[in-house]
Amino acid sequence: MGGEEEFGMENVYVKDPRLYELLGVEVGTSSESKLKKAYYRKARDCHPDKNLDDKDATERFQQLGEAYQILNNGESRELYNKLGYNAYKKRHASGGDMVDPTVLFTMLFGSERFKDYFGTLRLAAHVSEESDENGEDSAQDEKEKAKADEEAQLAREQELTLKLISKVGVWVDGSHRQFSEWAQKEAEELLETPFGGPMLVVLGTMYREQAEIYLGRQSMMGFGGVASSFRHSTGIFGSQIRTTVSAIQAMRRQEQLQAYMQRTSESDDPEEPNSAEHRETSGVDSPNTDSVENPTKREEDAAHVAVKTLIDMLELVWQVTAMDIQATSDSVSKTVLSGNDLGEASEQDLRDARLPLVDFFQQHIRGTNESQNASTAPAGWGGMWSAVQASWNGPPKLGEGQKAQRRVDILNARACALKEMGDIFVRVGQKKDVKDELLNALGIDKKEAEEIENKIIELEKQERIRQREEKKKQQAQKHSAKIAATSV
């Protein structure tokens, strides 16, 4: 890539405009929203997952990420404008700048193959629609955005419901073996997309749990559904708590690391408490002497902090996105099993859906014989025992080649299909771990990640020691000042 000197918008001098041209924005622009939107659109078009036959797609995707990484940061953008690309790269070989993790993650796992299952993710939609330059929104704008978001989510779920009903329709029609083979093949293909494994596990878990809740209500006197519903609710609540805790921990950790890097970056100033000159005159030892006095090590520490920060933030963004997938697929599964698309349930449909034991008691309490099926509600203790067994075991499931006709059979078949698909998705998805997917996307192997983690733990330990020493020093100064004031 080459570029010529020019003056960009607002008369900003730009030595080399190539990165602006790569993103397709005005040369010299400093609008974060414009840069983010341009990056999102360009990266989405050349995403490797959408260009499997293009060998250069990955390289173009990485170039776009680098351009956004440099231009989205005020300091790096100013330096790039002044030096140009080649000179900037030489000075920043350590790679201390970071891409916006929200946008980066959207690009990494924005696979078109999953759109039939959870549509356009809220995170992706927000990045795509963001166009406000000054970032200032009125309360009315926020309300309108919230309403539009709710409407978009409703439309998203309605579309996904129809698609899921169509998918499980193969099982409802009696082609169980064909459905299972399709689900296995589908899961294996989805596994090969970016973050396919973790997304399969989230989807499969929601499908399976909603199916177990529905089928559980038809068996074990209905208590099976209660137990499954409790497990499902506690699982969702637990994931929400984990996400909240992770967010707090990530922010606290990053504050500590940034404080450490800020302190070491100011160490060249002899007036700073951590500078070598100050330590010599004050007699205070620092636990971070190596990093402070060694610029090369300081740059290495900065690079480690930058990478670890990106990993932590991407993990957090994944958890938030997983909650979006979880909530959407959960709602869609419920709607599929509600039978709303089948029309209003008739009186016969309601009788078919009742537990046999309930039907038995209703018939005998009323003294009528509503059922024409002797095996469903026969008279006497024998009839009650049969009703108990039927209520415990649940309705008989249709076999291969048997098409569901009654409303109750259609919904039971859908539940069986969802459970089968959920089991397959989870089993296949577990072949790839979230952490492995993140490291692979960032081009970091496990050994390197462990080294970075150990280094960060060491830096955090050093920062805690420094903070304790600083606190002791402040307490000593206060004590000395108090004694001096008393003596006076």
Image (spheres, rainbow, N blue to C red):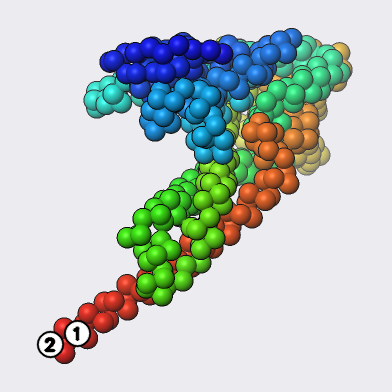
Q: How many marks?
A: 2
According to the image, label 2 marks what residue? 488
Viewer-closest of 85 and 244: 85
Can residue 203 be seen in the rendering of this structure?
Answer: yes
Can residue 398 be seen in the rendering of this structure?
Answer: no
Q: Residue at x 52, y 39 (%)?
A: 96
Q: Residue furthest bottom?
A: 487
- Looking at the rendered image, the quarter that the C terminus falls into is bottom left
- Looking at the rendered image, the quarter that the N terminus falls into is top right
Viewer-closest of 269 and 235: 269
Q: Secondary structure at mark 2?
A: loop
Where, by quadrant of the figure, is residue 15 drawn?
top left
According to the image, label 1 marks what residue? 484
Residue 436's spot in the image, x, y percent? Answer: 70, 38
Viewer-closest of 417 and 196: 196
Residue 298's spot in the image, x, y percent? Answer: 52, 51
Residue 303's spot in the image, x, y percent? Answer: 55, 43
In the image: residue 253, left or right of residue 181: left
Q: Residue at x 56, y 49 (%)?
A: 296
Q: Are marks 1 and 2 in contact (CB under 8 Å)?
A: yes
Q: Secondary structure at mark 1?
A: helix
User: Crowding near pointer 2: few (<14 within 10 Å), some, many (20+)?
Assistant: few
Q: CA distance from mark 1 to mark 2?
A: 6 Å
Amino acid identity at mark 2: Val
Q: Residue at x 41, y 13 (%)?
A: 5
User: Crowding near pointer 1: few (<14 within 10 Å), some, many (20+)?
Assistant: few
Q: Residue at x 36, y 55 (%)?
A: 269
Where, by quadrant of the figure, is residue 316 drawn?
top right
